[in-house]
Amino acid sequence: MPLRTAVRCLSTPIRGILRPSTTTSNRGYAAVAEARSLLEHELETIRTGGTWKGERIITSKQGPHINVDGSRGDILNFCANNYLGLSSHPQVVEAGIEALKKYDLEQKLAQFHEREDCILYASCFDANAGLFEVLLGPDDAVLSDELNHASIIDGIRLCRAKRFRYKHMDLNDLETQLKESQSSRLRLVVTDGVFSMDGDMAPLKGICDLAEQYGALVFIDECHATGFMGPRGRGTDELLGVMDRVHIVNSTLGKALGGAAGGYTVGPKPLIDLLRQRSRPYLFSNSLPPPVVGCATRAVELLLASNEIAQSVGDKTMRFRNKMTEAGFTISGSDHPICPVMLGDARLASLMADDMLKLGVYVIGFSYPVVPKGKARIRVQISAAHTDQDIDRAVDAFIQTGRKHGVVS
C-alpha cells in the first residue's frame, strides 16, 4: 500500500484536542482525560502484545524493486497487490507523476482543521464506518441526532456501545439522554455539522455546553461544511466558535474539496494511531488513487493560503437566498449553500425540476423516503464557481416555473 504510507502524517501536534479547553467544566475535563487515558492504554496493550503494525514509507514507485524509508539499498517487494505490474508501467506512471510528488495530504488536513493528526479513507462513509467500533465498547454510550447521515447510523450499528437517539437538534432531549446514559464509561455525542437535506446547522455551542456539563465527548461530520463554513472555511465548529471543544471531526474530499472520492478523520493523535491499528475500512481496503490525493492536496493548499474562495460561496449563497425569498419561495436552512426550495408535494417537486431543466437549469426534486412525507423540495447547491449572472438566471427560471405551477404569483 505505497500511497497510503506515503501520505502518512508525521508532523508534530498542532492543537491539543482531547486536552480540555479553558472553558471545559470539571466533568468535561474528566471525560477528556479518561478518553485519552483509555486510548493510550489500548495502544500500549497493542505494543506490549507484539502486534503493533508500523507503517513503512515506500519512497519509490511501486514495482518488484522498491526503496523503503529507513532501509538501505534495493528492496525486493513481495508485499503488494500489483499482480499485473501495471503500477510501474511507464504510461501509468506518467499519468500519476504529478500527484505522486505530493505525500503530505494527511498533514495538511490536520493543519487545516487544527487537530493533532489525520487518517485517510477511501470515502467518508468508510471513515464513519471505521470510527465508532474502534473508539466505543460495551461499557460506552453513543448519543446520535435522529437525522444524522446514513453512514453515521450504519457506523454506530457496527459498534457495541449503548445507543441513545435524541430528537433533531433538540438540546432538551439531548440533555435527557445524557442523564439517562450517565452510568456509561465514555459517552460520545454524534451529529452532522450541517444536515444535507435541509441545510440546517447543528447547535454546536449548546451541544458542547451539555457535553462538558455531563462529561461527554463531541463528534461532528463536516461533509457539507469543510472548506466554506466559517471565516476561514474550517467548518461549522469554526463558524460557531467551538473548534477547541469538538474532539473528533470526519469529513470528505469528495464535495467542496473538489475530489471524486476520499474521506478522513482528524482528532487526537492516540485516536488516529488506534484507528491505524484497528479500523477495518482502513486495514482492508485500497488506498486513494494518486490523482485524487494530488487534487485534494492542492485544494487544501489553496484554502490554507486564502479565504477568498470560502467568502465567495457565502456571497453567492446570500444572493440566491435573498432573491428567491423576495420572489415568494420558502428556502429552508440558514446561510448555507444547500438551499432547499420547499414545495411540499412530491409530484410538484418532480415536475418543477423537469421544467427547470428545459430552461437550462439542472436541479433535482427530493421526496419521500429521502425526506419526510409532505416535505418534498428542490435542493439547490450554490458554488463559488457560479457567477452572479448564473445565480440570477437560476432565480429567473424558478420564478417562471413557479408561476406556471402556481407556487408564486
Image: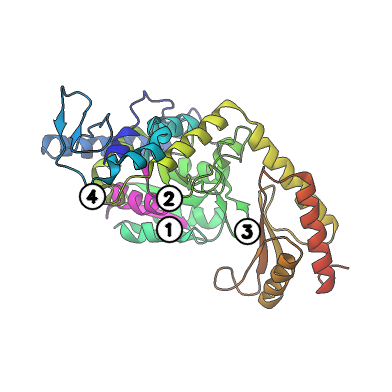
User: Which quadrant, please, contains the N terminus?
Assistant: top left
Is there any visible trace of residue 389 in the rendered image? yes
Query: In the rendered structure, which amino acid carries the disc numbered 1?
Result: Ser
Q: In the rendering, at what x and y percent does residue 299 appear?
A: 53, 36
Q: Distance of mark 1 from mark 2, alpha carbons? A: 8 Å
- Chain-order first, disc 3 or disc 2: 2
In-front residue for pair 78/341: 78
Reading the image, the residue beneath label 3 is 198
User: Element type at marker 4?
Assistant: loop
User: Which stretch is magenta?
Assistant: 120-144
Relative side of 89 to 193, left or right: left
- Chain-order first, disc 4 or disc 2: 4
- Chain-order first, disc 3 or disc 1: 1
In this rendering, the answer to whether 50 lies above or below 223 is above
In-front residue for pair 124/254: 254
Reading the image, the residue beneath label 2 is 124
Query: In the rendered structure, which amino acid carries the disc numbered 2?
Result: Cys
Relative side of 10 to 180, left or right: left
Reading the image, the residue beneath label 1 is 151
Q: In the rendering, at what x and y percent does residue 64 appear?
A: 18, 38
Q: Distance of mark 4 from mark 2, alpha carbons? A: 29 Å
